[in-house]
Image (spheres, rainbow, N blue to C red):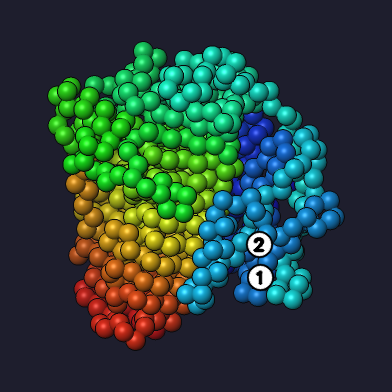
């Protein structure tokens, strides 16, 4: 049964949409018709839920995020009053099986736990874990779950209604070695792996077995399948392996990704999971930190020296007569999904060393990233997730990237402002963000609009920004209805080091292509930042840089403490407030406000 849920304050818009998405999200039915029905149901229920008003309900709303033959992933929205809740107990079939705080199936949890064990973080905002992955279940079996929120003494403060979910049947397995793949790290296995994918039946699993490295060029996934990576997929260093007669690349165009899925209408129900690694072989590696690899210095000026696949793709472009900038833009992503609905990525999967971006999505819906380790620092332009679709949940994951961690893109200029759909309905929680130019990033492509985002209960340690909204004159659109709350930020020092930034002066020197400018300047509005701690940054704790014809408006901060940052710098802002926003005593020029109206502080 699907419940239409109401929420308080401005968060009602984005939380409701994300919650409705979860309530109907069923990645493993492997039924294209059912998937289409689910997407339609999500749209209709989300529209109804977004229109609802506030609520004071303290009943936990629990949803099944995904399920397979032996696991069920649950998540729940925090109730209206959650300040005294310290943990959530999970009951299955009437018996206590664990709690959110003890759920060891989160890839982010050990990083989060280590953060709070550090005494220098004793004053950081404590995040609230509100998901659980039940493991070791029996296939084709129904399970009943109840969640109870408890205080520090174990008293039950709230509980959910029962949620029932069945596990799936065991999938038929298509081991790539049975189709001729050789896991020696040198043999090119593109044809063998593709043969296993082509042979895979509906609901089947293509297995990359543990303990072996399978080198390959571009491969193409299809409807209703699982790619299970227990070993390693290693991208070929040969640029020619990313184009084929079946999937050619236009002259001067971007190469195919290592892992691809694309539909003429849409591809339905894909899973990319496992405890192994997908390595793009994009750049030489220089070192590692906390078990996470670090790329050698990577940029257009070092690509021929430090690139591997990146260098070969760049050189191929130059040899074809492209300019340096255009040749550099031909680099391939690690994973590219276009017109794909119902995608699940994670369950311990490591994604690393892309030639360009890590995961790119467009023109699809309903994507879940759960328990992924995105390890792409310091690969140039290596966004963790570049999302241009509708419906996204990111949870239990670690991001350590060479560009934006999670980026939302909605096109540029007049045509995209008129013709593209907005990027919307996004829920990001219980993640750990290390390096990255920004953890949650709206723009710089904002033409069609980016909206309805809830980012909560995340730890950020080493990123360049917590919430980064960026665009430029002529791009058009903007971003709205965003809530960023209940999160701890520290060492906001990557890149420019600005914890919260809303700018219309962003410049992308590496951008390729031209567009007709939108007549209206981009605007960021209806944005709420609540209950966050910030300890250390290079620059202003809050930076607002609007335009005279594009004033950012209705942006509200409350209960945010800054330590070791510069003060707030605000230019071209209106109808906004900063309540109980504090800077430490060492901060001079706490508030610099120009060209702004109706802006109140504390």
311 and 31: which is toward the camera:
311
Residue 471 drawn at (x, y percent) = 27, 54
Residue 240 visible in the current orientation: yes
Instruction: Tell me if residue 379 comes above or below residue 336 in the rendering.
Output: below
Give the residue drawn at x 34%, y 35%: 282
Question: On the image, numbered disc 2 is attached to which residue?
Answer: 101
Q: Residues within 10 Å of mark 1 (few under 14, many from 20)?
A: some
457 and 422: which is toward the camera:
457
Considering every residue shown, the one lying at the far right of the view is 94
Question: On the image, numbered disc 1 is attached to which residue?
Answer: 86
Q: Is residue 3 left or right of residue 521?
A: right
Element carrying mark 1: loop
538 and 40: which is toward the camera:
538
Residue 109 drawn at (x, y percent) = 58, 57
Residue 254 drawn at (x, y percent) = 29, 29
Residue 422 drawn at (x, y percent) = 40, 46
Q: Residues within 10 Å of mark 2 (few under 14, many from 20)?
A: some
Element carrying mark 2: helix
Viewport quadrant of the C terminus: bottom left
Instruction: Tell me if residue 198 comes above or below residue 529 in the rendering.
Output: above
Instruction: Tell me if residue 34 comes above or below residue 187 in the rendering.
Output: below
Give the residue drawn at x 36%, y 13%: 245
Query: Are the residues at dot 1 and dot 2 in contact (C-beta closer than 8 Å)?
Result: yes
Give the residue drawn at x 33%, y 69%: 537
Considering every residue shown, the one lying at the far bottom of the view is 585
Give the residue drawn at x 49%, y 28%: 213
């Amino acid at each position: 049964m699907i419940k239409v849920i109401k929420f308080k304050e401005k968060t009602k818009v984005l939380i409701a949409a994300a919650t409705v998405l979860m309530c109907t999200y069923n990645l493993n039915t492997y039924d294209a018709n059912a998937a289409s029905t689910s997407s339609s149901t999500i749209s209709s229920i989300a529209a109804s839920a977004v229109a609802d008003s506030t609520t004071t309900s303290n009943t936990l709303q629990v949803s099944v995020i995904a399920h397979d033959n032996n696991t069920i992933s649950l998540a729940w929205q925090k109730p209206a009053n959650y300040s005294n809740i310290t943990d959530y107990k999970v009951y299955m079939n009437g018996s206590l099986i664990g709690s959110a705080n003890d759920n060891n199936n989160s890839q982010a949890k050990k990083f989060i736990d280590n953060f709070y064990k550090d005494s220098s973080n004793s004053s950081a905002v404590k995040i609230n874990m509100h998901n659980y992955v039940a493991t070791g279940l029996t296939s084709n079996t129904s399970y009943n779950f109840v969640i109870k929120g408890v205080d520090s003494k174990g008293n039950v403060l709230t509980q959910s209604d029962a949620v029932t979910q069945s596990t799936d049947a065991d999938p038929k397995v298509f081991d790539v070695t049975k189709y001729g793949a050789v896991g020696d790290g040198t043999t090119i296995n593109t044809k063998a792996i593709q043969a296993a994918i082509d042979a895979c039946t509906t609901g089947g699993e293509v297995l990359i077995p543990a303990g072996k490295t399978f080198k390959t060029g571009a491969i193409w996934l299809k409807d209703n399948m699982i790619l299970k990576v227990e070993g390693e997929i290693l991208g070929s260093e040969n640029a020619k392996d990313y184009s084929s007669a079946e999937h050619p690349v236009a002259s001067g165009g971007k190469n195919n990704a290592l892992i691809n899925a694309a539909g003429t209408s849409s591809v339905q129900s894909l899973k990319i999971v496992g405890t192994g690694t997908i390595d793009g072989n994009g750049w030489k590696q220089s070192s590692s930190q906390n078990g996470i690899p670090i790329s050698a210095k990577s940029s257009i000026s070092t690509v021929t020296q430090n690139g591997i696949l990146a260098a070969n793709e760049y050189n191929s472009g130059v040899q074809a007569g492209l300019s340096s900038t255009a040749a550099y833009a031909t680099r391939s992503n690690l994973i590219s999904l276009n017109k794909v609905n119902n995608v699940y990525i994670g369950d311990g999967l490591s994604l690393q060393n892309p030639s360009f971006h890590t995961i790119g999505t467009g023109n699809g819906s309903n994507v879940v990233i759960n328990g992924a380790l995105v390890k792409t620092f310091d690969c140039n332009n290596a966004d963790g997730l570049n999302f241009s679709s509708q419906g996204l949940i990111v949870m239990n994951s670690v991001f350590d990237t060479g560009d934006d961690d999670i980026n939302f893109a909605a096109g540029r200029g007049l045509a995209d402002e008129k013709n593209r759909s907005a990027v919307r309905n996004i829920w990001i929680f219980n993640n750990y963000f290390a390096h990255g130019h920004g953890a949650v990033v709206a723009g710089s492509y904002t033409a069609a609009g980016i909206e309805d985002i809830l980012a909560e209960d995340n730890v950020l340690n080493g990123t360049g920004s917590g919430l980064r909204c960026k665009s430029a004159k002529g791009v058009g659109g903007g971003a709205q209805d965003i809530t960023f709350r209940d999160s701890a930020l520290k060492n906001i020092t990557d890149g420019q080091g600005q914890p919260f930034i809303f700018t219309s002066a962003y410049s992308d020197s590496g951008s390729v292509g031209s567009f007709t400018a939108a007549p209206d300047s981009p605007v960021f509005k209806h944005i709420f930042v609540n209950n966050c701690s910030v300890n250390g940054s290079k620059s202003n704790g809050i930076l607002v840089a609007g335009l005279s014809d594009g004033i950012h408006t209705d942006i509200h901060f409350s209960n945010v403490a800054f330590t070791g940052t510069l003060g707030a710098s605000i230019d071209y802002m209106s109808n906004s407030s900063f309540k109980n926003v504090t800077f430490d005593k060492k901060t001079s020029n706490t508030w610099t406000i120009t060209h702004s109206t109706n802006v109140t502080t504390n």
